[in-house]
């Protein structure tokens, strides 16, 4: 199974979304089949709890199908799913943390550990292992928020505004986070 579908194209998203909203099961299946693996990989970059990831993916797609007539229009299905999935995953992680008293009442979305090695391996699967190790070492220098912004911008081609909505930051904060991350990456990749 490939780690990241780099050939993703959002050209037909608006039409597929309209068909799905109208009750076209084939369109829904197309959306599900095209994006489910991506959401699972994205979930793994936030948590290692496979059951929680699977539950959240199922919940997102179930809710989308159940409320299809009420969904907003979109021309970028992947962005829409990332936003829904991330909110659902963070909500469920808070519930689990509260139930198990792992984090007490101190859970914050900014403490997410983001593992870029999965994505890095896909992007650089033809590059020597030492180059991948060098890139991963650089990613370890980034904060979890910086890793997530870089992932959404460069691995999923989301706009700054879309990233801001997904991670709940204003556009200036996204620009600053991305800029600081790129400075750190350039500095450590030049070594």
Image (cartoon, grey):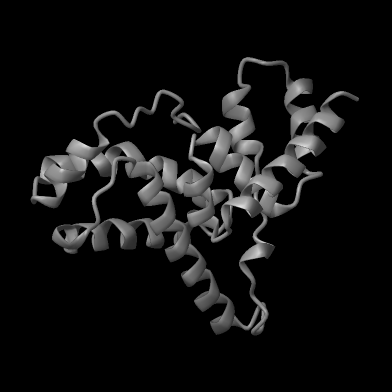
Query: Extreme front residue here?
Result: 172
Left/right of residue 149 with respect to residue 9 in the rendered view: right
Left/right of residue 49 with respect to residue 18 in the rendered view: right
Question: Is residue 30 among what the camera can see?
Answer: no
**Relative to 66, is 77 above or below?**
above
Query: 168 and 46: which one is in front?
Result: 168
Q: Quadrant of the C terminus?
A: top right
What residue is shown at x 42% (from left), y 65% (from top)?
88
What residue is shown at x 57% (from left), y 57% (from top)?
170
**Residue 104 locus on image (x, y percent):** 66, 84
**Residue 179 locus on image (x, y percent):** 72, 40
Query: Extreme right residue here?
Result: 191
Q: In which quarter of the image is the N terminus?
A: top left
Residue 183 image-quadrant placement: top right
**Relative to 190, is 110 above or below?**
below
Query: 157 and 25: which one is in front?
Result: 157
Question: Is residue 151 among what the camera can see?
Answer: yes
Query: Extreme left residue here?
Result: 23
Query: 52 and 69: which one is in front?
Result: 69
Left/right of residue 5 with respect to residue 18 in the rendered view: right
């Amino acid at each position: 199974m490939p780690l990241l579908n780099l050939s993703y194209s959002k050209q037909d998203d608006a039409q597929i979304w309209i068909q799905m909203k109208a009750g076209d099961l084939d369109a829904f299946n197309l959306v599900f089949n095209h994006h489910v693996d991506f959401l699972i990989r994205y979930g793994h970059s936030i948590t290692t709890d496979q059951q929680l990831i699977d539950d959240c993916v199922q919940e997102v797609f179930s809710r989308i199908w159940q409320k299809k007539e009420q969904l907003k229009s979109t021309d970028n299905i992947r962005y829409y799913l990332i936003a829904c999935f991330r909110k659902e995953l963070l909500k469920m992680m808070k519930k689990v943390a509260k139930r198990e008293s792992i984090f007490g009442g101190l859970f914050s979305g900014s403490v997410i550990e983001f593992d870029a090695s999965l994505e890095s391996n896909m992007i650089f699967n033809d590059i020597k292992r030492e180059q991948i190790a060098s890139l991963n070492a650089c990613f370890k220098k980034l904060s979890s928020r910086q890793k997530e912004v870089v992932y959404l911008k460069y691995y999923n081609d989301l706009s700054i505004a879309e990233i801001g909505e997904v991670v709940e930051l204003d556009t200036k904060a996204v620009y600053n986070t991305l800029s600081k991350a790129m400075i750190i990456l350039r500095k450590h990749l030049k070594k």
